[in-house]
Amino acid sequence: REERRREAMERARIRAEERSARRTGQQTKPGKSRPVPAGGESLETDSRPLPAEALEQTASSEADDEEIPIRTLEYQPPTRNQPEVVAAAPEEEDDEPPFDLDEEPAPSKRLPKRRRFYKLPSSDLLNEVPAGTGYDSQELKEIASRIKSKLEEFNVRGSVVQINPGPVVTTFEFKPEAGVKYSRITTLTEDLCLGLQAESVLIERLPGKPTVGIEVPNTRREVISLRAILESDEFHDSPSKMTIALGKDINGRIKVASLETMPHLLIAGSTGSGKSVMLNAMIMSFLYKATPDEVRMIMVDPKRVELGMYEGIPHLLTPVITESKKATNALRNAVLEMERRLKLLASHGVRNIDQYNRKMAQLRQEPRGLFDEAEEDENLRPLPYVLILIDELADLMMLERANVEECITRLAQMARAVGMHLVLATQRPSVDVITGLIKANFPSRISFRVATRVDSRTVLDSMGAEHLLGRGDMLFLPPGSSRLTRVHGAFVTETETIRVVDFWKEQAAPEYDESYLLTPPSEEEEAEEDAEVFDGEQDPMYEDAVRVVVEMGKASTSTLQRRLRLGYGRAARILDMMQRDGIIGPPDGSKPRELLKRPDWLREIEGTLR
């Protein structure tokens, strides 16, 4: 036994020496902080020259040319845009397997944490981002020289003082000489396109600077992946569940926006401009940010081919709607839901959905009775946000103009406080589709490339959208601002979308509320029903309401509204009649009324109900 113990100690000492030799066998290159493998092999590095180095080489070779600074701080071409993963030091080898191969990979650290029983998708479901191509400083200087010479042909003198490269366009800051009007420069847009041989050129003044920005398309356009936006700090740190991954601005900065602050969005653009890709990126942003308990969606797709891939995800409140009649019913029922939520918030003394959900969370933490703990009180459930997405507004306005415009206007005016938001998209931005009443209630708008200046003015109240490049190039009007922001939209493929949709389908089946597709009762019908009740006649829904209350063991107005599709006033009067008949007790704040009858009481008096 002693001999075996000595042999084991000797083997352990030899293994420890080998491990120590392996750890100290790596060398460090002089002047570098990164470790390199033993033997002098260097790590792979990016062979593309840095913008600053390229600028110095050009300056040294052309000392006689005028020096134009090229900004490199605001735009950094993406190299990988992968989640931040801390690289661990190499561990000592062991005979045991280091980890379970069947274990499910952990989600990206930059994505929101899982909530409740749902698991948010990982960014691994999206494609990797290709490496950026960078830019050629010599080519940019040549373009700046051509801009200066072309403007001098029309007696517009000045100089290009700075160049700001971006992922899709490069902004040349032109400083005109004294006495040159800004309007003279903007009228030379088409002449600059001829001189630069560019598809389109956009000219705008730069806020806070005495220069004019001339945006010229790049010869090599960068593809902005949705994965790069979803893994960014801007998207991850946004507290809103309705955060939209827009893309990048002209300087390469990531742009995200919250639908809560908009609070509704109008999107317009001609065919092939990138409008459908923008809608898919928006929906994917919500699927990466919120669970079905937090955000529910109503999708209207009259074209039948754009949003059908989302059929079956648990976030849907109704199946994807393709018929105009059902779409109109969904909008009218959404107005009724908005009114119900407004009354609910008013009864609890709160002003918006966030305050209501926080108050419900506090009430759920209070001690409850023995029998109340068995089932969750429906009146204490948080309210989810509701997104109503209409892909083609022109088709609905053509068939159901009066009802659609009225419902959209009412929702846009009052639905913000109760967490209901509208997103309208159309490829025909004419005044008969985007009416003045609709546009007045949609302060946030996005316009892709349109055909004429009139269409651009219809959407944005200003020109410029007719000069966009297409393929995701957009002008964004933020809420509370009159200044347009040029953004290059994020690109997501259909394959990536299907992966995320399948991920959600595997977790849960959708819980549709088919009542949204039914025709709601008109005001005349409700008035007739109310008159019948006021006349003292028997309510035809009274017996059904009693059965619902006895079966569920509690009585509340919202339960009767949902189960029997009644209005708020009629449901409240039925509860008062039950209290008068001794079936339920008096109201107790926001809690359901107490049931005074035994569960078997209904079978005993079957047939004797009033």
Image (spheres, rainbow, N blue to C red):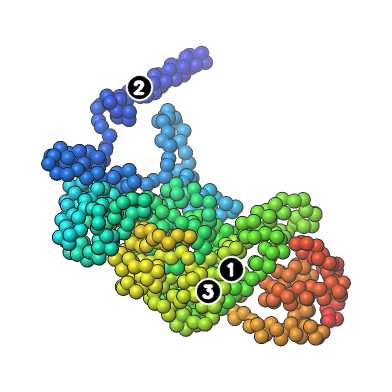
Above or below, 87 relative to 596: above
| In-image side of 216 versus 512 (left or right) | left
Instruction: Identify the residue at image location x=69%, y=64%.
Output: 346
| Number of other residues with Cα within 10 Å of mark 2, as a class: few under 14, some 14 to 19, many 20 or more | few
Report the residue marked by disc 1: 414
Question: Which residue type carries mark 3?
Answer: Ile
Above or below, 68 relative to 296: above
Question: Which residue type carries mark 1?
Answer: Met
For marks 2 and 3, the one nearer the N-term is 2
Horizontal and vertical percent position of residue 407: 55, 76
Report the residue marked by disc 3: 408
Depth check, front residue: 298 or 536: 536
- The image quadrant where one finds the C terminus is bottom right
* Labelled disc at residue 24: 2
- Rounded to the nearest whole Å, what is the CA distance between mark 2 and mark 3? 70 Å
| Residue furthest front in the image | 179
- The answer to whether one can see residue 384 in this image is yes
Horizontal and vertical percent position of residue 69: 24, 44
Horizontal and vertical percent position of residue 419: 58, 63
For residue 146, which quarter of the picture?
Answer: bottom left
Instruction: Identify the residue at image location x=73%, y=70%.
Output: 557
SS at badge 3: helix
Above or below, 300 relative to 384: below
Depth check, front residue: 330 or 291: 330
